[in-house]
Image: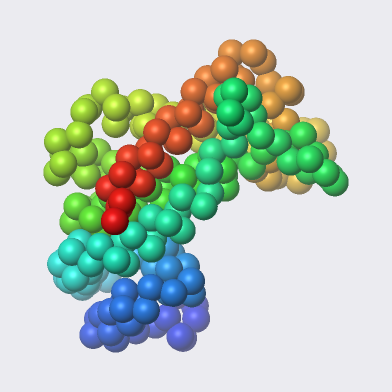
Amino acid sequence: MASNPKWCLGVEEWRATFANWIHRSDAPALLHASIFFDFRPLFGAHELSGALREWLNDNIKDNRLFLKCMAENALASRPPLGPVRDFVLSSGGAQAHTLNLKIKGITPFVDAARIFALYAGVSETGTLARLRGAARTWKMAAEEVEAWVAAFHFIQLLRVRHQHAQPSRDEVVGNRIDPEQHNALDRRILKEAFRQGRKLQAVIARYFEY
């Protein structure tokens, strides 16, 4: 992003850009928000990032219509479990009998944590820190939140293990796995991790039932 002059903006310009996205709440605005609202400082005057984060939190946490649109967008990507908790796999082509650990596994947690953080005014940008920070703000059950954290960790672990092994099999590194190529314990834990993702999404849906 920093290499694109379009996104090399001053603080006031970023505020105006963010305000425009929040006001519009259309598909392009939601896409941009899901990317740029995760900003964090890497070098230079970190206080500029802090001031922008404080402004964003103050201007978005009470804007429930925008957050509802973000929630609806996030809920479109569901963990791949069927009615009887079996995996829902791709059915055709080169991707047959696989599922995408990033889009269907990691993304539901990342999107939910982002919405929680914006709604609770939490300044953290990491997924797990956001979940825990929002949980403290709303006094959510610690064991429920830690189940989400453990599920997120396991999906990430499985994804990294898979990607680490792919070059040795002359495969292009990616996020798709065939669950049948994993042992029974990993499959069982993965199903539970996806179930936790579904539970997290159900909480998001309840928060924005209006």
Observer-nearest of 40 and 136: 136
Residue 175 visible in the current orientation: yes
x and y, in percent, of residue 95 in the image: 78, 43
Residue at x 52% of width, y 20% of height? 189
Observer-nearest of 161 and 106: 106
- The coloring applied to the image is rainbow
The C terminus is located in which quarter? bottom left
Left or right position of 167 against 191: right
Left or right position of 122 against 125: left
Q: Answer with the quarter of the image where residue 90 lies.
A: top right
Q: Answer with the quarter of the image where residue 64 lies.
A: bottom left
Observer-nearest of 43 and 164: 164
Q: Answer with the quarter of the image where residue 82 lies.
A: top right
Number of dots carrying numbers: 0
x and y, in percent, of residue 29 in the image: 43, 74
Observer-nearest of 3 and 94: 94
Left or right position of 91 against 29: right
Residue 53 visible in the current orientation: no
Extreme-right residue of the structure: 93
Residue at x 39% of width, y 60% of height? 70
x and y, in percent, of residue 110 in the image: 42, 48
Residue at x 64% of width, y 13% of height? 184
x and y, in percent, of residue 180 in the image: 73, 22
Residue at x 39% of width, y 68% of height? 33
**From the viewer's perspective, is residue 120 above or below residue 11?**
above
**From the viewer's perspective, is residue 166 above or below residue 44?**
above
